[in-house]
Image (tube, grey):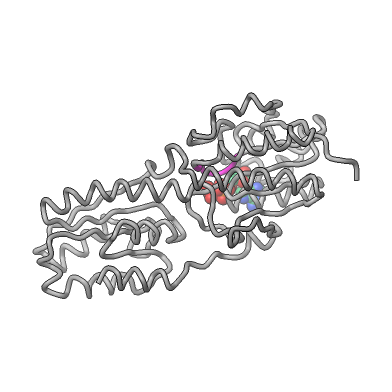
Amino acid sequence: MDAMKRIAVFTSGGDAPGMNACIRAVVRTGVYNGLEVFGIRRGYQGMIDDDISQMTRRSVANIIQLGGTMLKTARCAEFMHPEGRSKAAENLKKRGIDGLVCIGGNGSYTGALHLFQEHGIPTIGLPGTIDNDLFGTDFTIGFDTAINTAVEAIDKIRDTADSHDRVFLVEVMGRDAGFIGISVGISGGAEGILIPEDARDLEKIYRFFDRKDRRSKSFSIIVVAEGDEEGGVLQLAHKLSSRYPDLDIRATILGHIQRGGSPTANDRILASRLGYSAVLALLEGQQSQALGIVNNEVKMTPFEQAIKQQKPINNSLIRMAEILAS
Ligand code: ATP
């Protein structure tokens, strides 16, 4: 195999704070190692549309602190089909791009795996999603920023909850997983946490409010993951109001504010370590691997495994949260 000379980086799927820090690390590590580094705009869509340009150390100056992604991101239906991937591969090959760094989630990894199997273009995947639900890494890029944003919002909601003796149901992101919910619940000092992984969570809330002393307690915060089986805060507010008509219940959906903003120091460090390691992995000849950080060490997981396996939530955290709220 010839030595790698040209690589490209792109962001795909939902944006996450820290993606820019990651792009910066890929570009600078690549240039340091004598590579030509290209940026692909709008993920797989840009690969198909040939929206690709060379990047330099300078083109990633002053972006480490910015949320979103300077390369833009997109979801691309055309790439789901072999014809779309052939167009993308042609564009990469005509520019002599022989390795990719994909910053995204499970869907993006699946696309990269197909591209490798069909056209032999190696990709290193980096976990860029606020949800922290990717296998093979303790943390994903953007998660720390998202939970800090949500906790800041909860601290503010707490002021009103306290002043008016209200129960606030706060919905956080996490369609399929409760990593944001459990972390925000613990750090926001919530009285209850509802996440998809805990089938008994509503029962616990009922138990909490069934205690008369609890109902007369000045206020409560309940954190609800958007993917919880109870169906979001509005339905839950309705259920709780019917059961406890004496409670003054309000529902708040934090929504997309959780996806934006300047990345925390932890996210910048994670993004930098992973971006740097991805380039070294490509230079070593690695192909089709997802990188992550496990026990503070960079770890590689084959795409097949990273895509298939589910990251479990730490059950001891669920138990601890229950005890701390009691
Ligand atoms: P997030 O966690 O933010 O949703 P993601 O990477 O999982 O990130 P997706 O929308 O699932 O986001 O995937 C991003 C893109 O990857 C898709 O728009 C599509 O272009 C490509 N992709 C996803 N699944 C496949 C697949 N099975 N085959 C080929 N390409 C795919």
Query: Whole-percent x and y of residue 114?
Result: 73, 50
Q: Nearer the viewer, residue 93 or 66?
A: 66
Residue 184, quarter of the rendered image: bottom left
In the picture shown, does residue 303 fall above or below 100?
A: below
Name the dominant secondary structure of the magenta segment. Answer: loop
In the picture shown, does residue 323 fall above or below 223?
A: below
Query: Whole-percent x and y of residue 80?
Result: 65, 46
Residue 34, quarter of the rendered image: top right
What is the span of residues highlighted in magenta in the rendered image? 11-16
**Residue, x 43% and y 55% (percent of image)?**
174
Query: Whole-percent x and y of residue 176?
Result: 46, 59
Q: In screen coordinates, is 313 left or right of 183?
A: right
Residue positioned most to the top? 58
Position of the N terminus by quadrant: top right
Q: Nearer the viewer, residue 93 or 242?
A: 93
In the picture shown, does residue 206 fall above or below 37?
A: below
State yes or no: residue 12 in magenta: yes
**Residue, x 39% and y 42% (percent of image)?**
256
Position of the C terminus by quadrant: bottom left
